Amino acid sequence: MELTTSLDEICRIVARAREFDAQVPAVDPDDGSNMADDDAVDVLEDETNTSVEQELRTALEDLNEDEQQELLALVLVGRGTYDAGEWEDALQSARDDVTDYVEELYETPMLASLIEAGLAAFDLSCDDVGTVS
């Protein structure tokens, strides 16, 4: 299996997806009118940040259709729907079963983990990508 999408690009998307997945909605039931009343609890929550969402969506939209299909196929392998030996089947499934690749990827829970698991099935990793030696 040879990816047409660069590993650097995939790893940038993984990093953005990880930030997106880490966001949680605020759940402070005793939200005070100021931080002193609130015991400054709100700052501990990583609330939804629209810039993170937009960065992920833009990174996905910047891929061409073939690259989006590859990323979705990596998700399918990472999820265990297909194994590494069934790469062509995973790609075909991505092509046949989805019409809006960006939306499908964007709405995938644990997107970063699934992409990384898909990469690992092919002995690829984001561990050293983007580091200067």
Image: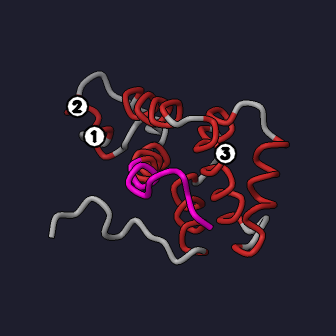
Where does label 3 land, which residue?
Answer: 69
Quarter occupied by residue 74 = bottom right
Question: What amino acid type should be assigned to the residue bearing mark 3?
Answer: Gln
Magenta span of residues: 1-12
Q: CA distance from mark 3 to mark 2?
A: 46 Å
Residue drawn at x 76%, y 61% as measured from the top left? 88
Query: What element does badge 3 sit on?
Result: helix
Numbered tag placed on residue 43 in the rendering: 1
Residue drawn at x 58%, y 68% as measured from the top left? 117
**Can you give x and y, in whole percent of width and height, for residue 69 in the image?**
67, 45
In-front residue for pair 93/37 = 93
Numbered tag placed on residue 35 in the rendering: 2
Residue drawn at x 22%, y 31% as measured from the top left? 35
Counting residues from the N terminus, which is met first, the one under dot 2 or under dot 1? 2
In-front residue for pair 54/132 = 132
Packing grade of label 1 (10 A; few <14, some 14-19, many >=20) is: few
Q: Is residue 15 above or below residue 43?
A: below
Given this view, does label 1 or label 3 mark the residue nearer the observer? 3
**Can you give x and y, in whole percent of width and height, for residue 116 in the image?**
52, 64
Direction from residue 34 to residue 77 in the image, left or right: right
Packing grade of label 3 (10 A; few <14, some 14-19, many >=20) is: many
Q: Are marks 2 and 1 in contact (CB under 8 Å)?
A: yes
Given this view, does label 3 or label 2 mark the residue nearer the observer? 3
Q: CA distance from mark 1 to mark 3?
A: 38 Å
Quadrant placement of the N terminus:
bottom right
Counting residues from the N terminus, which is met first, the one under dot 3 or under dot 2? 2
